[in-house]
Amino acid sequence: MVFLGGQVLPGNVGRAILGPFADQRAVDALNHSLGVDRPLLVQYGSWIWNFLHGDMGTSYVFRAPVAPFVIDALGNSMKLALVAFVLVVPIGILGGVIAALNFNRPLDRIISLGGLSVTVLPEFVTGIILILIFGVWLRWLPIAAAWPKGAGFFTQLYYLTLPSLPLFLVLFGYIARMARSGMIEALDSDYTRTAVLKGLPWRMVIWRHVLRNALLPTITVIATQTGYLIGGLVVIETLFRYQGIGSLIFTAARGKDFPMLEAGILTIGIVYAVATLIADFLYSVLNPRIRLGAEQ
Amino acid sequence: MSATDTPVSLPTPDTAQRSPWGEVLHSLSRSGTFLTGLAIVVFWIVCALFGQHFVPYDPLASDIINALTPPAADHWFGTDQLGRDVFSRVIVGSRDILTVAPLATILATIAGTALGLVIGYFRGIVDDIVSRVLEAFMAIPVVIIALLAIVALGTSKITVIVVIGLSFAPIIARTVRSAVLAERELDYVAAAKLRHEGALHTMFVEILPNVIPPILVETTVRLGYAIFAVATLSFMGFGIQPPSPDWGLSISSNYGMIGGGFWWTVLFDALAIASLVIGVNLVADGVHGAFND
Amino acid sequence: MTDPRQATNALELKDLSVAYRVGRRNRAVLRNVNLTIKAGEAYGLVGESGCGKSTVALSVVRYLPRNGSITGGSIALDGKDVMKLDAEALRRARADSVSMVYQDPGKALNPSLRIGRQLTEIFELAGITGQAAEDKALAMLNRVRISDPASVMQRYPHQLSGGMQQRVAIAMALANDPSMLILDEPTTGLDATVEAEVLDLIAQLRRELSASILFISHNLAVVANMCDRVGVLYAGMLVEEGSTRDVFNDPRHPYTVALLRCLPRGGQRKDQGRLDTIPGFLPGIGANIVGCAFADRCALATERCRAEPPPLYELGDGRLSRCHYHDKAQSLPRATPAEIAAAQPKQAPPVLQVEGLNKTYASHGRPLRAVKDVSVSLRPGETLGLVGESGSGKTTFARLLLGLVPPDDGGSIELEGKKLAPRLASRTEDQVKAVQIVFQNPDSALNRSHSIRHILSRALKRLGGLTGKTLDTRLEELVRSVRLTDRHLVVKPRQLSGGLKQRVAIARAFAGDPRIVVCDEPTSALDVSVQAAILNLLADLQSRQDVSYIFISHDLGVVRYLSDKIAVLYLGRIMEFGPSEAVFSGPHHPYTEALLSAVPKLDRTESARIRLDGEIPSAANPPTGCVFHTRCPRKIGAICETQEPELAEAQPGHTIRCHIPYDELARLQRPKTLEPA
Ligand SMILES: Nc1ncnc2c1ncn2[C@@H]1O[C@H](COP(=O)(O)OP(=O)(O)OP(=O)(O)O)[C@@H](O)[C@H]1O
Ligand code: SF4
Ligand code: SF4
Ligand SMILES: [Mg+2]
């Protein structure tokens, strides 16, 4: 699909690279050497085949294999995403749980409205504001994400803090909101009433009976958020001048470097698919109704 | 027939009976979230419509001598690198985004509702295929879809509207579909079949009015995201094009200088986007609450 | 019962008032309820939906919804004031002395924990852990007579049937040996056969344990069988109280009198007169009540009633009645005259003739025979009652007739001698309007976006082929025929009560002069007082328009009242078919016998108890031979397991599917004649 998208883009590839004034014969020759004059399906088939074998094609712009670029970028993006994820999943869930336990009280209002507000802001807006605050005025954190060569783990983390914050904020509201509504539903359920009326201590009711049922739906949501997260990466990596998969796609799109673009997007697709698989797996492990099927 | 013919009386209402829509309006009018959001949105709409008449400077007029002056009495928000008045640009900057985003949302709502009604009502193979395609489509971040399409089609407001509209349509379609799936199991749909009503009547006269609430909620939420997306695309250089004083665009051309301390060239635009997006989402939250309590 | 707790009352409510906060206002739901349950006693609380029964229960365990609050009075459990307990003491009270079981056991159990875990945690509270707790849990499951308790311990709730889930819930409630057990509609929503078993279980456990019981139900007969004393709740007030026998045989409040008259009893039939009804509605919550709460609906009401709220008069023998004229309560005039134009028995040719109808669904790749080889016939003006447990194929059969689902090939449906196409789309306009339906749930059946006028006009236009003036005239007639008025036309369904909505649904079904109307549980979502009015209406319409009904209900009393013929279904097969009187008075099929025996009777006559144990088999995997053999109490031997019996004619027009010959069935069933419903 992405591939087709790349192909229907106008702009004869050879023409795009050589510029409008190049000789038509040169353009044709380049097109042939790049293989872009073969029928679409043939190109597609061989491209997928090669991709699966680790050969992602050759960049039009760099005239070099795409794979090292993509793998490098993916590694960088993973680091950034991981920092955001590791922070946001527990904090988001905690926020939702706390809000639900304080249903309709001021703390709930603050978390819910605050979460809603930060979630809906575009990453570049929160990014800019955070840069101004922490990078320009307070000067606590570096405003570009690229760390010096050979930096250790903590230095890298230091450089990644600011860029990961906008991602954190965008996801926080979602996760907190899902966790909150799952909690409220579970708290209002008959089985929670049963647990309370058994005389179980409140903590045990929450831990054993409420949380598990409440957080099941949240798990699925977290996985679908990978898509948003990646979209956010494009923006964040551009804003912080970070060499990740997002900025790779962005640069490739600008330069009409289709092999690079396709490889980048297919990689994203695979990451998304894997995330969804993991979520489905977790969901079915945690949910006996799916694991064991309905016998009745 | 004798006494059995005494007609049954209406139940004595214990609350003043309002129509369902009256009730929604009533609860909206008492929702602080909704009213706050509405005030913000209305403010920006007024700016978009009439801003150019009351701003102190022409937002496009450059004045190189006074470039990059910090906020002061004659330029409340300072000036940018071409000496243009930031305050005037922020006020008028709402115009393009408030044209493009709502139009994109309307497009998404119409396309998504029609699609969702059809696949929800007919189910079967059409639904399976379309739903799969929609799912695959939704897996790709909107920014990237837009990026690709805009690279392919070139940048123009129309492209942005179409791209955002069409990439949001599946999301609305999914909401409508699940609402329709629930509705079609209700007995009034069977009753319509037992009158030999056609599919169009059943979809549009019987089912559609009942799925309006989720559509409305989803539409307001989508409007927030449309603003999000337009701003982001403009920031990335794929959206609204110069010389518009658009916020995302301004940030994009000025943020390179924040290291130099020229914070006023981006801060106010950022806050403007933030306020508009939050305003729309407060409205959406209020609408959601009003339909679901 | 020599109980040390004898001295104190198990539960004592004093002037309990509860309100729910709706739209920023506190609305009263319970108004000064006084109620005492002695140790070891079973107390029944009855009343129409919405009168506050569950609110009483939830107040006692201090688990009101978020917006609910106790606005006055006190609650004492075992002499301890529940409202003064702090969180920890309240928790201990719940752990030690009070338990509750409620409707819908599927939701009451935690879906993601094994049954064993949900039971052992109760014992862990008491400090019993590990194997000891497991043993105790197992013992508890044995106690509620669940089959194969060891494997139940390992299962999750969704792997159990509704009846088993409720047994587990009861086991959990009794695990702490409570002094007070609250049961809020514990059998509502279960099949009658399962209900009977669960009620038996509760009755038995009551004898074994010492718990006092607060039994809440809308079903008077259930309470009559389970309780020593009973209280009648109306608009959040106790209006009558006394021993069960007294209250049900000699009611002293007009409301109780009227409620009892609404029920079709003692095999009453539609041609023997109308049921009585209660006009009007329960006051809404928070209503401002001056005088007697029942005055608007009471035929005995006087000026005094409207001005002066009646106190709870003490009538001696522990009897109470909140009526100024309690001594005259029994002379309450009927709200609906009993006499009815006797329908003329006709010998017209059948309006409906169904032959060999089958429907197979696919379920997890396996065929599921939802309806198997069903043949019935029905004359104009007759009612065919369909009975059977859930999953027996009643609704599928109705949908086949309507053409909403296509039957398997072969088999035929004939309407007035002409074959009906299997699919609705290929039926003619005349055929479509001739077969209509009244659904169970009017909220689902009426489009909530449309006004009543729109709903009925559309039906008249499509089914009656009317337009313009004639449509308006006919609309008016139609509305009057279901006893609604013009004022009801302008509103949307949600502004009407359940009974009124059901009238609209009936009007819609009658818009095109139908020949057959399917009524699929048309009254089971309604209160008895409203149910009676709907049944009367259906009977009236039938005698006037000669329409035939296919009437589906789980309430055998109701089916008997309205039906001329009965078909008893089990796993999609007809087990018995014949004239209503013959089927009900017997001799009948062993399954019919069990169904009848499961019906709780108001007069507490201990009839021969025939209980079905075991689960209803899955229709996807029916038993061999006679499909009923896994549960049949009269099974005669191997032949039942290997050979499916024929639906044989026992008497002219009365067929039974059983290997036991008719005379033998007659002999077996004779000694204990059943007096159904
Ligand atoms: N949380 C709530 N908020 C507002 N009103 C409520 C709430 N819960 C119940 N009610 C209303 O209070 C009244 C009494 O409710 P309750 O559930 O106690 O009645 P019930 O006798 O148990 O009815 P049913 O037979 O339907 O179970 C009803 O009118 C009901 O609609
Ligand atoms: S007090 Fe009056 S209105 Fe109330 S029940 Fe008695 S007779 Fe009827
Ligand atoms: S055939 Fe056998 S198992 Fe079936 S109903 Fe008759 S006696 Fe029971
Ligand atoms: Mg209740």
Image (spheres, grey):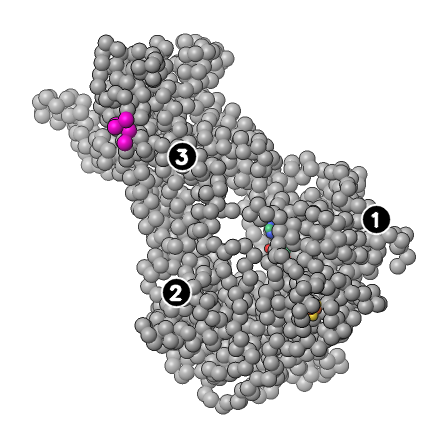
The residue depicted at 18 percent of the width and 25 percent of the height is A16
Magenta stretch: includes residue A65? no
Q: Which residue is mark 1?
A: C79
Of labels 2 and 3, the one closer to you:
3
Residue at mark 2:
C454
Query: Which of labels 3 and 1 is toward the front?
Result: 3
Chain of the residue on which disc 2 is drawn: C
Query: Is the CB atom of the residue marked by disc 2 within 8 angstroms of ligand 1's nearest atom?
Result: no
Q: Amino acid at mark 3?
A: Ala
State the extent of the magenta-drawn residues as a range.
B50-54
Report, in whole angstroms, how far the alpha carbon at label 2 lies from the one at label 3. 38 Å
Q: Is residue C375 above or below residue C362?
A: below
Q: Is residue B51 magenta?
A: yes
Counting other residues with Cα less than 10 Å from the Cα at mark 2, is it few (<14), some (14-19), or many (20 or more)? some
Circle 3 sits in a helix, a strand or a loop, which is it? helix
Q: Position of residue C111 (x, y in %)?
A: 61, 46
- Residue A130 seen anywhere in this rendered image of the structure: yes
* Quadrant in which residue A235 is drawn: top left
Q: Is residue C445 above or below residue C657?
A: above
Residue matched to label 3: B39
Q: Dot 3, how many residues are within 10 Å of its Cα: few (below 14), some (14-19), or many (20+)?
A: some
Q: Taking C201 as reference, is C287 left or right?
A: left
For disc 3, the chain is B
Mark 1 and mark 2: span between their CA atoms?
Answer: 58 Å
Chain of residue at mark 1: C
Q: Amino acid under label 1?
A: Gly
